[in-house]
Amino acid sequence: MKKKYSLEELYFKAANYCAYQERCEQDVYQKLKQLEAEPNEIGKVVDKLYEENFLNQERYARSFTRGHFEYKKWGKLKINYALKSKKIPTLLIKKALKEIEEKHYRDVLSKIIIKKRDSLKKDLCVQEIAQKVRNYAASKGFESELIKEVWNELN
């Protein structure tokens, strides 16, 4: 049986959880549920985390967007979907996505396309290569029209 934590202990555990890495409200709710906190306790802890600026949905959306674009090379569609699944408001998602420079976005997509194209077997026909590259770039969350544009520029 798990130990029952006081409200203060729950707050400190949640604050440490948020201090370690940027978190969204949903992450904190799940963490507190794992600690078997009551719904009213969760609400109080989350409110205090907002007051103390441990939680900030806009900051989270911006951080998530930067990290997943720069390091995981995710496109805007995949980032948008992931943030929606974390219950981030649409307005904050749009604001965070606007921070990605269009030229940099295209450059990253170009590199993804080139790397994937060069990794494919040379015995495939041009159409097969194009399809595999487009599917891969789409799976990374890039827009199909942009993928076609960049593919045509590169070939």
Image: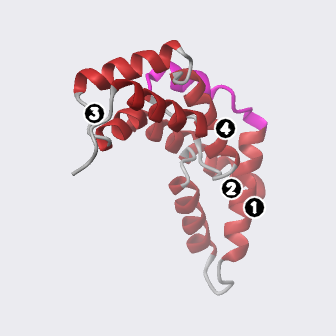
The residue identified by callout 2 is 151
Question: Visible in this render: residue 87?
Answer: no
In the rendered structure, which amino acid carries the disc numbered 1?
Asn
* Gap in angstroms between the C-alphas marked 1 and 4: 29 Å
> Which residue lies under the disc numbered 4?
66
Q: Which residue is under mark 3?
A: 37
Residue 155's disc is: 1
Answer whether residue 99 is visible to the viewer in this image. yes
Where are the magenta residues, as a range? 87-103
> Label 2 vs label 4: CA separation?
24 Å
Q: Secondary structure at mark 1?
A: loop
The quadrant where residue 81 appears: top left
Please, what secondary structure does the residue beneath circle 4 have?
Answer: helix
Front residue of 130 and 7: 7
**Residue 91 sits inside the magenta stretch:** yes
Q: Residue furthest bottom?
A: 123
Residue 26 position (above or below residue 107)? above
- Quick one: 144 or 57, which is closer to the camera? 57
- Tell me where residue 150 appears, x and y as whole percent: 70, 50
The disc, 4 or 3, on the residue closer to the chain's N-terminal end is 3
Residue kind at label 3, given as amino acid type: Ala
Crowding at dot 3, Cα within 10 Å, few <14 / some 14-19 / many 20+, comes out as many
